[in-house]
Image (tube, rainbow, N blue to C red):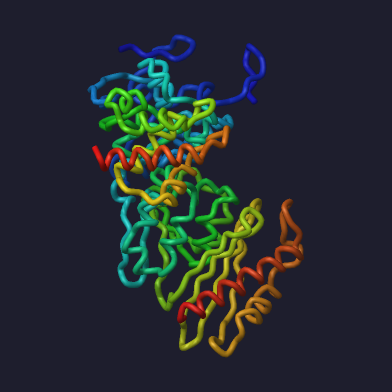
Amino acid sequence: MKSTDGGLIATSFRTIGDVAVIRPRTLDDAVAALMHHSEPPAILAGGTDMVARFNEGFNPRRVLAIAGVGELAAIEDDGDVLRIGALVTHAQGAHSDVARRAVPGFAAAWARIATVRVRFTATIGGNVMARRTRYEMPVLLAALGARFRVREGGEVRVWDAMPYLERAAAPRELLTHVEIPLSGLCAFDYERGMRPIVTLALAVRRTAGRLHLRVAVGFEAMAPHVLEGAWDHPADDAGAVAERLFETFPAGLGDHLTSNAYLRDVGRTMLGRQLTRLADGGL
Amino acid sequence: MAVSDPIGRQLDGEDAPPLRFVLNGIERAETVPARMSLWELLHDEFGLCGTKLSCSRGVCGSCSVLIDGVPQASCSTFAFSVDGRRVDTIEGLAAAGHPLCEAFAARSAFQCGYCTSGMIVLAKALLDRDPHPARQTVVEWLSSNVCRCTGYAMIVEAVLAAAEAVTDG
């Protein structure tokens, strides 16, 4: 609600105050604009979240509309890393042959985010930067051990997945790319059958002849939590591996939707199903 | 055109960017406040009332329009972002006599009708990409928008019928 001379009114785009728009065409110009103003402009990509925030009362003096920065709209595979520009939309990612070849299962998981209409405009960068715990892309990226490349002024920084996803967005920093390391990555699976209670993303890497599992557990009201362990496939039974991994699920971790005990139970069931699916698929 | 804010202050430059775009096939030039949504531009400046506003946060899709052929919620799109682009609304589709409009009417694919323009616009984007969509594809696309009367079955039938009409015609 917003208090006005006429009384309390529900906020909507009709109540947005004056705002100025800056429309850079290059990454350097975008970064410079973030440094130039005493109050950094709010970054607008696809607009899916920003407009919702405006409707909730957020009213920055300026927005930095980065949609025209073409450098941030590509997906590339350099053999070591799948590099995804922050402006890549969900639709682009879901239909990307580059992404499909580089990380089996990832493009298919990406296609399950949002709706057809929203996927045309919502971006991977916007999904991450919204810092909305119910969003699924951070869950996928946490499992994949993604790194986040940001620019602040002339400085480039690269963050590991969880430290980046757990920190608040820095207002002068621009997320430019999401990078997925490809070394040993041989399978990816995504389960969202119990959303919003819990979702699971699983990345499997083969290192020195062993399979390494990295599981991201997504919740409604918390940042994802990551579990890691080994899988001696095919000797190790999928159910036993899932059981073992969820023994490390921290006591006390839970949200308003469900208890820790229930999360453990449903989590190991889902993970067992994922591992079975991968095994049946010829991993 | 001079643009002012709600208390009469003049806006220019970054506060009121000039805008050139093609609306339902006609080239338009406007200067709009940067804070203005595309829905406001269509509704308030051009009097196009067929695009319906509902949730105001891009979820329900009743305000869908096509921007360069892509369905987008006009409530969640700033007007300045259509600079240099093509916008098509339900009025443009109706004027062109698109078979979707006829199919929705013939099958009574609406109850209160509030979601109808958004559904037709969304379906137009689908048929442009996939002239012969499978029923499941139609269902997946239409689930982007909300019909609060829950009349989805008739809407799906209308889209499939329109696809046949496009193919036949």
- x 40%, y 72%: residue: A182
Please provide percent x and percent y for residue A279.
51, 80
In this picture, is B58 found above or below A141? Answer: above
Outermost residue to the bottom: A235
Left or right of B66 in this view: B115: right
Left or right of B133 in this view: A221: right
Residue B61 in view (yes/no): yes
- x 35%, y 27%: residue: B89
In this picture, is A152 found above or below A183? Answer: above
- x 36%, y 49%: residue: B133
> How many numbered markers are drawn?
0
User: Which image quarter is the N terminus of chain A in?
Assistant: top right
- x 61%, y 74%: residue: A272
Give residue A217's quadrant in the image.
bottom right
Outermost residue to the top: B8
Q: Nearer the viewer, residue A67 or A108?
A: A108
Q: Nearer the viewer, residue A249 or A169?
A: A249
Q: Nearer the viewer, residue B48 or A187?
A: B48
Q: Nearer the viewer, residue A244 or A150?
A: A244
Residue B130 in view (yes/no): no
Please provide percent x and percent y for residue B84.
25, 31
Please provide percent x and percent y for residue A115.
47, 47
In this picture, is A57 found above or below A212? Answer: above
Left or right of A193 in this view: A129: left
Please provide percent x and percent y for residue B39.
42, 25
